[in-house]
Image: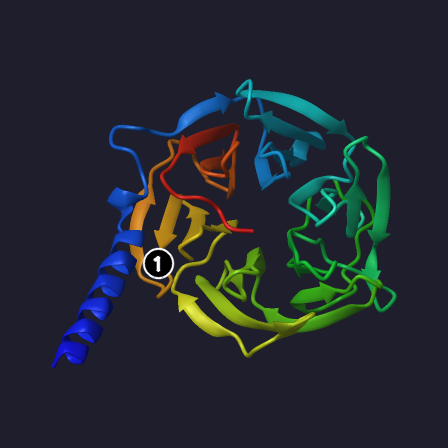
């Protein structure tokens, strides 16, 4: 009887802790609203945090990359002429990886602004336009390649009919992993061994189990919502964007929405000294929102 009671009590505590972890009241501070850091842009996208907690993001129409310095709470221009960078992510060596879709390329940019074009196609054909990327600890990267024809592209010719998810390993080999209607936001977690990919036009977000280096399980439906950008916190809650920021628990249940007074909320990432500030890119502005949770790498 003692053992049964003890086991039941442990189970109850486990349930309560997990319920608490996905309760939005335990995630956000009362009365604290998203704060505009700057509204000087044409269209912001692709936020990602470096090892120090500074968040880099793109203004694709103006072909620039900026970063938010958390110490001064100021936005600083990092790079002009970015290959029309869209989504970004930092690799394990703290280089910025960019989806530079002007020529269907992926770039690596060091902190001292040295640029390396990693690749510009798949099997000899131009990619449609890499959109978002997540780097793993193996030195590889998962990236989405939908098709959004840009006004600034010149002499573009569609060479790949599929809109797909790819993996590029540390040796440069690229593998097509899956196809979608219009794959967009992507994020992974080494902690949870999950990869999330949003099919924005289908209105769905999917989840894969990460089984090894560039190896995934079959995709499963995570929730009935597409997203432009995605991030994940230490509890496994997923943050999707569009009309503000929508938060789903690990089971795919929506638990909260952060309203943002812009036409479109494109993307979101955690940053700051303790990785607990939600950085939000939305149309012509960028916002910050301190939280009680932390992002997970």
Taking the image as shown, residue 133 lies to the left or right of residue 293, namely: right
Give the image location of residue 53, x and y in percent.
Answer: 58, 34
Give the image location of residue 227, x and y in percent.
Answer: 48, 53
Query: Does residue 220 appear in this view?
Result: yes
Give the image location of residue 80, x and y in percent.
Answer: 76, 28
Q: Quadrant of the N terminus?
A: bottom left
Give the image location of residue 93, x and y in percent.
Answer: 74, 46
Query: Does residue 22 appear in this view?
Result: no
Taking the image as shown, residue 81 lies to the left or right of residue 144, namely: right
Here the colouring is rainbow
Q: Residue drawn at (40%, 55%), measured in percent from left and top?
A: 235
In the image, 167 versus 181, the foreground residue is 167
Q: Quadrant of residue 215?
A: bottom right
Taking the image as shown, residue 186 lies to the left or right of residue 276, namely: right
Count of numbered badges drawn on the protein: 1
Q: Residue drawn at (45%, 24%), measured in percent from left and top?
A: 36
Q: Residue drawn at (79%, 64%), measured in percent from left and top?
A: 159
Q: Quadrant of residue 203?
A: bottom left
Q: Which residue is mark 1?
A: 249
Above/below status of 64 relative to 183: above
């Amino acid at each position: 009887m003692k053992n049964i009671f003890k086991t039941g009590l442990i189970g109850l505590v486990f349930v309560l802790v997990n319920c608490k972890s996905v309760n939005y009241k335990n995630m956000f501070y009362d009365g604290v609203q998203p704060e505009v850091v700057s509204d000087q842009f044409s269209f912001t996208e692709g936020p990602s945090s470096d090892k120090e907690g500074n968040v880099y993001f793109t203004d694709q129409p103006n072909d620039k990359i900026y970063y938010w310095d958390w110490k001064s709470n100021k936005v600083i221009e990092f790079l002009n002429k970015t290959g029309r960078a869209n989504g970004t992510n930092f690799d394990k060596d703290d280089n910025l990886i960019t989806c530079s879709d002007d020529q269907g390329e992926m770039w690596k940019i060091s902190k001292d602004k040295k640029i390396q074009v990693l690749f510009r196609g798949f099997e000899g054909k131009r990619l449609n336009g890499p959109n978002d990327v997540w780097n793993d600890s193996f030195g590889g990267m998962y990236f989405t390649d939908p098709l959004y024809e840009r006004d600034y592209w010149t002499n573009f010719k569609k060479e790949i009919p599929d809109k797909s998810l790819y993996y590029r390993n540390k040796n440069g080999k690229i593998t097509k992993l899956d196809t979608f209607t219009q794959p967009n936001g992507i994020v992974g977690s080494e902690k949870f061994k999950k990869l999330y990919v949003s099919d924005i036009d289908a209105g769905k977000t999917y989840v894969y189990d990460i089984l090894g280096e560039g190896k995934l399980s079959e995709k499963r439906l995570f929730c009935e919502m597409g997203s432009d950008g995605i991030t994940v916190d230490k509890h496994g809650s997923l943050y999707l964007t569009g009309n503000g920021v929508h938060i789903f628990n690990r089971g795919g249940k929506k638990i909260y929405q952060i309203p943002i007074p812009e036409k479109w909320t494109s993307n979101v990432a955690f940053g700051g000294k303790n990785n607990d500030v939600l950085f939000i890119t939305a149309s012509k502005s960028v916002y910050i929102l301190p939280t009680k949770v932390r992002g997970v790498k």
